[in-house]
Amino acid sequence: MTDAAELRRRTREFIAVHPPAATERAAFLKARFDAGLAWVHYPEGLGGLGAPRSLQAVVDAELEAAGAPDNDPRRIGIGLGMAAPTILRFGTEEQKRSFLRPLWVGDEVWCQLFSEPGAGSDLAALGTRAVRDGDTWVVNGQKVWTSGAHAARWAILIARTDPDVPKHRGITYFVCDMTDPGVEVRPLRQITGEAEFNEVFLTDVRIPDAHRLGEIGDGWKVAQTTLMNERVSIGGARIPREGGMIGPVVESWRERPELRTHDLHQRLLKLWVEAEVARLTGERLRQQLVAGQPGPEGSGMKLGFARLNQEISGLEVELLGEEGLLYEDWTMRRPEKVDFVARDAGYRYLRAKGNSIEGGTSEVLLNIVAERVLGLPSEPRTDKDVAWKDLAR
């Protein structure tokens, strides 16, 4: 299945059998997955056809023209962009068949249990412990900054299984059931007034060994696949020209000439060009993904995404003047997804502050770009060969 014309024909045949206007949404999505049209580059039987990733655009265009429903990717973004590619690469056949279909159709939301109060930028220093007990692992610890944990059915989790080896080597990767009675989710109220983030406490949570991804002690290697895909999904999402944060600013500029000044015009032109460069760079990055797994280039995209969002939202607030200082609602809510464009300028300005923290801080990403993209010497690390239990904390 490498021919666009054949894939287009197959998609049209699928639409004829399952007309979107007459098919219930959930049934349509499940049928699409079973037909291999969910993500065509995945293997047959797992929502794909083993086709080149680039042909997904052919399927999407046909389905969009027919008015087909999508799977609400913003709501299930962690599952789609992080859990799924990790499960595909490291999961057993049973894990793939169990998790991927409900993940893609949106029946089950996923979250990420990586960061901890004492292990954020230095994620490998994590202290959540997993101790084996027969065919299960008993997990105790605390995670933080967990987006969507309050709505999640499953979580991707990394925990320390061997404290006697250096920090990167004693970690194992698991799939955690968020409905386990030992899992407690508490909201973290943000500067926006909402709590899409959470802290998660794990107390004697029992995870079956069958829910381990990869080998024992190889969790850092597995996590790198997750993190690289995360940065691509955050910074390299496909958007149209003038999509994303630049769109509302440009719209205000065109519709409200009384707000314009020469200085704001120059800054808007600069940011418009940078937003378009970022959009095209993201398109090139997605084309590179056709050849294999994402690399460190995604860190550069996510780095630029954070900076641009903060500068653009700052310009929008200045452009709107006193109106830009208004904020629609401080009500404490626990949303299931983030929508920058549908909210007001005040929300965009405040929420964008988190872009340089979530998905890897900008400082960490600068190090990755310097060392793994530019080939610059790495910073001295005195803890590289020290057992985790002997590290100062």
Image: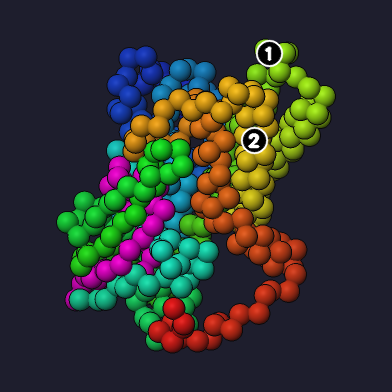
Q: Residue furthest front?
A: 322
Which residue position holds label 1? Answer: 256
Q: How many numbered discs sit on the rendered protein?
A: 2
Mark on residue 314? 2
Q: Residues within 10 Å of mark 1 (few under 14, many from 20)?
A: few
Magenta residue check for 147:
yes
Q: Quadrant of residue 236?
A: top right
Q: Residue furthest left?
A: 181
Q: Nearer the viewer, residue 24 or 199?
A: 199
Q: Which residue corresponds to the image point at 60% horizontal and 62% vertical from the top-left? A: 364
The vertical placement of 185 against 165, above or below, is above
> Could you tell me if residue 293 is visible in this image?
no
The vertical placement of 154 against 261, above or below, is below
Magenta residue span = 134-159
Give the residue type that dot 1 points to: Arg
Q: Residues within 10 Å of mark 2 (few under 14, many from 20)?
A: some
| Helix, strand or loop under label 2 | helix
